[in-house]
Amino acid sequence: MNGTARISDTELEKAMLDLAARCAPGKTFDPTDVARVLAGASPEAWGRIMPPVRRMAVRLAEEGRLVIYRKGKPADPAAFKGVYRLGPPRLD
């Protein structure tokens, strides 16, 4: 998909959950990985979809389907700021 096309919530959710499913136990991924999968490697393209990526990350974290990490620790999806990473929920 190119960076000029509108990315649907369904596409965002699928890409995010696919990356989470591929994470090794205890590992996380960068939210820019989601944007690059959907918009391509150009920073101009993937940079434009970072706000929707963040909104989807918050939604999925609030639903318990994803965890947002800040400085290596789970963060409150409603209150985190700054750089973050994403990972699957722990099963233990």
Image (cartoon, rainbow, N blue to C red):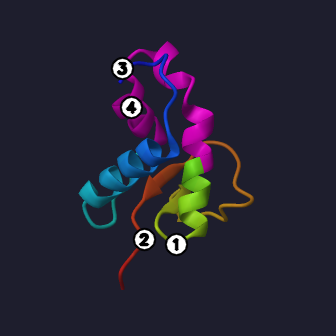
Q: Is residue 35 magenta?
A: yes
Using residue 47 as the reference point, say whether residue 33 is left or right of it: left
Residue matched to label 2: 89
Mark on residue 41? 3
Using residue 27 as the reference point, say whether residue 85 is left or right of it: right
User: Distance between the Cα atoms at labels 1 and 4?
Assistant: 23 Å
Q: Position of residue 67 (x, y in %)?
A: 50, 64
User: Distance between the Cα atoms at labels 3 and 2?
Assistant: 27 Å
Q: Nearer the viewer, residue 71 or 13?
A: 13
Determine if residue 30 is in view: no
How many residues crowd mark 4 within 10 Å: few (<14), some (14–19), many (20+)? many
* Amino acid on which disc 1 is placed: Gly
Q: Which residues are magenta?
A: 31-55
User: Distance between the Cα atoms at labels 2 and 1?
Assistant: 7 Å
**Which SS class for mark 2?**
loop
Residue matched to label 4: 38
Determine if residue 45 is in view: yes
How many residues crowd mark 3 within 10 Å: few (<14), some (14–19), many (20+)? some
Q: Position of residue 76 (x, y in %)?
A: 67, 65
Of mark 2 and mark 1, the one earlier in the sequence is: 1
Of mark 2 and mark 4, the one earlier in the sequence is: 4
Q: Nearer the viewer, mark 2 or mark 4?
A: 4
